[in-house]
Amino acid sequence: MTTGVAQTGVAQTGVALSTFATDPTTTDVVGRAIDLADEAARAGIDGVWFGQLFSYDAVTLAALVGRAVESVTVGTSVIPLYPRHPIHLAAAAKTAQAATGGRFQLGVGLGARDLTEPTFGIELPPPIRGLRDHLTALRPLLDGRQDAVRTETITAAPPLPTAVAGAEEQIPLIVAAMGPQALRAAGELADGTLPFLAGPKVIREHIAPVIRKAAADAGRPEPRIIAAVPAVVTDDVDRARAAAAESAAFYDRIPSYQRVIELNGSSKAADLFVIGDEVVVADGLQEYLDAGATEVVVTQADLIGDDTRARTWEVVGRWASGSR
């Protein structure tokens, strides 16, 4: 079998899967996810990513899909750090790594305070302090070590071994970071960033320079910059634009997204959607690589239906084969 996995062992192109779980026609979430991952692999796409909803568990689903479809990497985009404890999150990630034969990637993020605190009844610590503390605790745990980490915001002191047989290959730790302080933390303590709705200008001027300098100063390898790009190949651009405006309105109210949208010179989140024919979308994705992204993950391809999703994925696969 010809695989879609790049020689580096990580995905250079990916697609995000999430809306299938809320589709009323879905009768088996795991089975549908496996079918979609297989379709993505056949289109020439390297990896599939799962967002964390309030229904399925993204790490578990990624493990099941990666076990069934051996020609893709699988990852989470992203797991909110709260309220999961690093010991529990690392254990799940190592189990997924073992299940997939080393093809799992852990994407994490701070989440939205206004959503997290009332949902779980917890009070979050200062965001950057909490992010740094979690990343500091996660790395040794993901590596199967038993280091004790005690900080202002977290204690992770496993009393027993944490290694998982079959998960020896290091798990990439990716942070959904866009602000300068979060990017510095990701560069110093993780393997890269996975920004969403950060346009090419933001990647070039605000994300790539900060995270690369932070990684270099910390003596870390070149960080991955995985641009999550909403993209739809369609002839009905007006319909897709209207759907984008509706689906992305939520992000217009979140300060961190407002900032990167403005930095890109855009007025609203929907402006960052790449919508058009095959040439428009391929050129739009290439702009992210030219701006400094190392990889692209296409999101929202099913914005107006499965037909456009399949068409978009085919374009992504063809574009990726020519961009390497």
Image: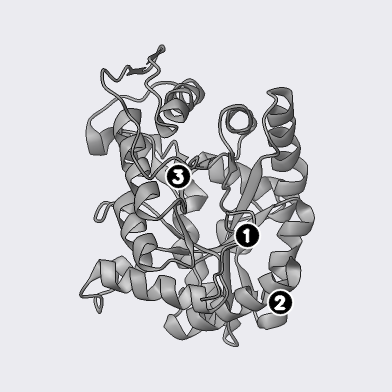
Does 52 appear above or below 114? Answer: below
Residue flagged by tag 1: what amino acid is it?
Gln
How dense is the environment of label 1, judged by Cα within 10 Å: few (below 14), some, or many (20 and up)? many
Asked whether residue 113 appears in the rendered view, the answer is yes
Residue flagged by tag 3: what amino acid is it?
Leu
- Residue 194 drawn at (x, y percent): 56, 47
| Residue holding disc 3 | 106
Does 74 appear above or below 98? Answer: below
| Residue holding disc 2 | 280
Q: In which quarter of the image is residue 154?
A: top left
| Residue holding disc 1 | 12
Asked whether residue 85 appears in the rendered view, the answer is no
Does 72 appear above or below 42? Answer: above
Residue flagged by tag 2: what amino acid is it?
Val
- Residue 50 drawn at (x, y percent): 40, 57
Callout 3: helix, strand or loop?
Answer: strand
Label 3 vs 2, first from the N-terminus: 3
Cα distance in 3D space between marks 3 and 2: 31 Å
